């Protein structure tokens, strides 16, 4: 396991704190929900339990990113952070769907419950999830996996706020349908907030080009690099939620010796680092050598494919 930085230690503390507090809150919600016959608290407990699993998965992925590469996994386990973000988003979608179904059921089968108890218990959820989410706020834009954890916690805080409001209204009006309306409204808001994360995590899991990288910009950057005549066979993908890789063929002039060729490569790699592409593999081709991609035919020995 690689040595952890200060930032890594803080993230581990954030994950452990989030998992512990949310698990304790799940127990409180289950006990209170069963005692006062509150479906809103029980459904929120199920939602929070899914988030406990998601946070645990995110923490495991965060730890696996520190594992050194080996002969079998040459990039280590960095991509687990992308897979964790995708799985977490799917979990969140499923939990939102379950809440919506439960809320719709309650609209047509309302049962008396204690609005005061609902509001008090849910208020603890705002505090717990809000404080834990703030621990991820600083690094959420740097790592999609951390952003996934942040959105989970903030969605819980918003949902708890909706339940508090519903509990207060129920306490003074006995309008039990309000609980369902608040749950549906908050769930729709959460759905919009995670849609972009779902698309991004799915694209990166399929080795799509990261959203902050444009291939036309890469081509322009290459042509602005002294010594590069053209570039093709560009492939860009995410190794993890924080690291990107690139492979490409660059065409250089025939009068460049090996030192000049290496200097051209280094200059281009340095320029790519500013675009957060730090794992770069470049193959050089000589201009007008008659062996370009469309002109050079390679005959493999029989049986080699």
Image (cartoon, helix red, strand yellow):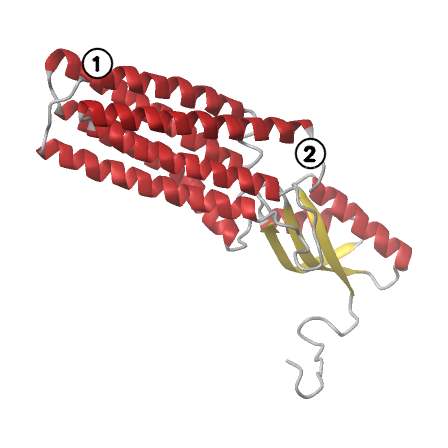
x, y (%) of residue 266?
80, 48
- In the rendered image, residue 138, in percent from the top left (x then y), is placed at 56, 24
* Of pointers 2 and 1, the one earlier in the residue sequence: 2
Label 1 environment density (alpha carbons within 10 Å; few <14, some 14–19, many ≥20): some
Is 2 located above or below residue 153 in the figure? below
Question: Which circle marks residue 286 in the picture?
Answer: none
Q: Quadrant of the C terminus?
A: bottom right
Residue in the picture at 30% in, 18% down = 121
Where residue 40 sits: x, y (%)?
23, 28
In the rendered image, which residue does mark 1 sit on?
Answer: 116
Question: Could you say which quadrant of the image residue 300 lies in?
Answer: bottom right
Which residue is painted at 14% across and 32% down in the image?
A: 106
Residue 200 in view: no
Q: Secondary structure at mark 2?
A: loop
**What residue sits 46% from the left and 19% below the top?**
131
Question: Looking at the picture, does residue 215 appear above or below residue 28?
Answer: below
Q: Depth check: 126 or 258 in front? A: 126
């Amino acid at each position: 396991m690689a040595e952890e930085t200060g930032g890594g230690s803080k993230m581990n503390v954030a994950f452990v704190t989030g998992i512990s507090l949310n698990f304790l809150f799940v127990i409180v919600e289950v006990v209170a929900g069963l005692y006062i016959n509150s479906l809103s608290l029980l459904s929120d407990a199920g939602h929070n339990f899914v988030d406990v699993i998601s946070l645990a998965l995110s923490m495991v992925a965060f730890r696996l990113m520190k594992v050194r590469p080996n002969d079998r996994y040459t990039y280590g386990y960095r991509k687990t952070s992308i897979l964790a973000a995708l799985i977490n988003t799917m979990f969140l979608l499923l939990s939102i769907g379950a809440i919506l179904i439960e809320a719709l059921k309650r609209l047509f089968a309302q049962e008396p419950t204690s609005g005061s108890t609902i509001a008090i218990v849910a208020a603890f959820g705002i505090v717990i999830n809000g404080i834990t989410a703030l621990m991820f706020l600083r690094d959420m834009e740097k790592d999609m996996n951390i952003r996934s954890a942040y959105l989970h916690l903030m969605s819980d805080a918003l949902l708890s706020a909706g339940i508090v409001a519903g509990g207060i209204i129920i306490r003074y009006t006995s309008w039990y349908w309000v609980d369902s309306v608040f749950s549906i409204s908050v769930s729709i808001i959460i759905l919009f907030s995670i849609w972009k994360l779902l698309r991004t995590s799915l694209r990166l899991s399929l080795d799509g080009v990261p959203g902050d990288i444009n291939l036309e910009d890469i081509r322009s950057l290459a042509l602005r690099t002294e010594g590069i005549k053209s570039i093709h066979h560009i492939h860009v993908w995410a190794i993890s939620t924080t690291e990107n890789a690139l492979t490409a063929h660059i065409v250089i002039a025939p009068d460049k010796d090996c030192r000049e060729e290496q200097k051209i490569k280094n200059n281009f790699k340095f320029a790519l680092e500013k675009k957060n592409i730090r794992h770069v593999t470049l193959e050089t081709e000589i201009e007008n050598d008659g062996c370009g991609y469309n002109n050079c035919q390679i005959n493999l020995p029989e049986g080699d494919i």
